[in-house]
Amino acid sequence: AQTVTQSQPEMSVQEAETVTLSCTYDTSENNYYLFWYKQPPSRQMILVIRQEAYKQQNATENRFSVNFQKAAKSFSLKISDSQLGDTAMYFCAFMRGSGAGSYQLTFGKGTKLSVIP
Amino acid sequence: DARVTQTPRHKVTEMGQEVTMRCQPILGHNTVFWYRQTMMQGLELLAYFRNRAPLDDSGMPKDRFSAEMPDATLATLKIQPSEPRDSAVYFCASGEQGNQPQHFGDGTRLSIL
């Protein structure tokens, strides 16, 4: 079974600064996808960014980028120019690309990020 | 923007009562997932469907939970009888194809007294 570990239960960052959230995962698969989801106090689950394991290039989405280290099974999220609206729980998630249990998400426990004015 | 719609948004009921949660996936999405979120366990997959067929419900307590898709626009999750330990936020998510990102509804916050 796949496991996803987020080792930072809580983090804080000053507005306009940069913060990096950590995520590691354990799998024997070669075909998989990784995601970061954001859950603000409103409870919505919002997709932030997606990475295909077969792609070497790190995904970016505006102020959000990832550092995907496949050999190390690491998938960290960098938020640049942090904004107050970035305050939320951030979940790292793993998805198998094929075989039994594919296409379902396995989530980490989350990191609570607070952006301080 | 198309959205996954879940009803009700909140539900409070007494233990032993039947609870039904509904989900309307995004039109055209052929995979539907049910997740449960609690403080202790985080987000857990309960069940998922592809083209309305159940593919995996191993995360769901079979004796009291059931999930169905009577048609492509409706997924339901039922708990009968409900217990206080079922109190959680239940999310429905849908996806366009297997490996595409899942889009989540706003969740149903369930409280069993």
Image: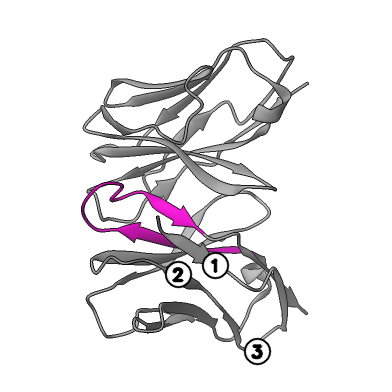
The residue identified by callout 2 is A25
Label 3 neighbourhood size at 10 Å, few (<14), some (14-19), many (20+)?
few
User: Mark 3 = which residue?
Assistant: A17
Q: Earlier in the sequence, mark 2 or mark 3?
A: 3
Task: Give how far across and how far down residue A42 sits, in percent.
Answer: 65, 50
Dots 2, 1 in contact, CB < 8 A: yes
> Tag 3: residue type?
Glu
Q: Viewed as shown, does residue B108 lie left or right of B28?
A: right
Mark 1: which amino acid? Thr
Of all chains, the one bearing label 3 is A
Question: Cα distance, mark 1 to mark 3?
Answer: 25 Å
- Disc tally is 3
Same chain shared by disc 1 and disc 3:
yes
Name the residue: 54% across, 67% down: A5
Q: Residue B52: name its quadrant.
A: top left
Residue beneath disc 1:
A5
Percent across and percent down for residue B3 are 41, 43
Q: Position of residue B112 (x, y in %)?
A: 72, 23
Q: Chain for mark 1? A: A
* Location of residue B44 in the rendering, given as x and y in whole percent from the top left corner: 52, 44
From the image, which quarter does the C terminus of chain B lie in? top right
